[in-house]
Image: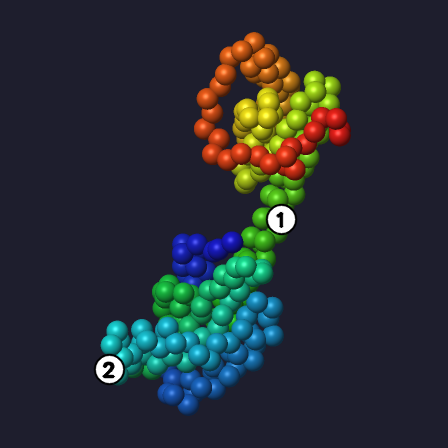
């Protein structure tokens, strides 16, 4: 799950007004950063990053031999997703320009104007995390709907397989279920069932399977583009249904 660049820009526009840009010296900027971190670190999904090596390189120039154009005040990692194998984070950077203004970036997307109050950055972080929560809720809803469709398809396939006497296997991705019908130890064919059309496909499934099996049993052989074989353990045997 990842928030798009367009969405990041929208969040910046909606939360950074630029009405009365702050003018701060280094000491004032330090105090504002302390206030910001005290308010955002307790939020689930927000974590300060005191070792923002990549962004410091950008600020210092490509060769590291130029004085910084802007001063990085702080970096906050905003977590979008995290699991055992994959972590996706957005970097929020607050920096001070030579004109003594404070600007904010989400990844490489800069706010349309300097900030007018540190509360704007807090609101930006909260809006970002709320959007992440909505995306997670929507993803969970889509997954639940897909699981229900898979269950409905499998229930119908199991019924047909038991009554008509054939073994099958299945593969599932985000948009379809692939139903693999076993014709013999060496031969099988696949029927693709899109989730957005499964209600139209299910009533026709038995007829399609019967026609293909009868054609095969008559001696006609099919040439398919299936790239993998299926082990014995992957087949659902009709005798076990």
Query: Residue 234 versus residue 81: which sits nearer the camera?
Result: 234
Q: Are marks 1 and 2 in contact (CB under 8 Å)?
A: no
Query: Residue 218 versus residue 164: which sits nearer the camera?
Result: 218
Looking at the rendered image, the disc whose residue lies closer to the viewer, 1 or 2, is 2
Residue 42: assigned label? none
Q: Residue at x 59, y 21 (%)?
A: 183
Q: Residue at x 51, y 12 (%)?
A: 220
Position of residue 66 relative to residue 154, above or below, is below
Residue marked by disc 2: 65
- Identify the image quadrant of the C terminus: top right
Q: Quadrant of residue 148?
A: top right
Judged from this view, the residue extending furthest toward the top is: 218
**Secondary element at image label 1:** helix
Any part of residue 241 in sight: yes
Q: Give the image location of residue 82, x and y in percent.
A: 56, 61
Residue marked by disc 1: 140
Which class describes the residues within 10 Å of circle 2: few (<14), some (14-19), or many (20+)? few
Q: CA distance from mark 1 to mark 2?
A: 48 Å
Query: Residue 50 versus residue 206: which sits nearer the camera?
Result: 206
């Amino acid at each position: 799950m990842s928030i798009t660049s367009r969405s990041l820009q929208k969040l910046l526009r909606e939360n950074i007004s630029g009405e009365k840009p702050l003018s701060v010296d280094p000491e004032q900027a330090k105090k504002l950063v302390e206030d910001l971190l005290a308010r955002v670190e307790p939020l689930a999904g927000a974590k300060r990053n005191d070792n923002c090596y990549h962004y410091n390189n950008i600020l210092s120039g490509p060769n590291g031999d130029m004085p910084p154009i802007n001063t990085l005040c702080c970096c906050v990692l905003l977590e979008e997703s995290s699991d055992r194998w994959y972590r996706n984070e957005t970097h929020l950077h607050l920096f001070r320009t030579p004109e003594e203004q404070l600007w904010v970036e989400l990844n490489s997307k800069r706010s349309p104007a300097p900030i007018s109050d540190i509360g704007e950055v807090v609101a930006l972080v909260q809006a970002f995390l709320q959007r992440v929560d909505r995306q997670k809720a929507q993803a969970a809803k889509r997954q639940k709907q897909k699981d229900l469709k898979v269950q409905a398809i499998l229930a119908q396939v199991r019924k047909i397989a038991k009554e008509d006497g054939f073994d099958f296997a299945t593969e599932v991705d985000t948009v379809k279920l692939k139903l693999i019908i076993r014709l013999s130890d060496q031969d099988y064919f696949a029927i693709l069932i899109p989730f957005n059309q499964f209600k139209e496909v299910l009533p026709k499934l038995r007829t399609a399977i019967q026609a293909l099996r009868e054609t095969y049993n008559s001696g006609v052989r099919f040439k398919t583009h299936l790239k993998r074989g299926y082990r014995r353990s992957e087949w659902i045997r009709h005798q076990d249904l």
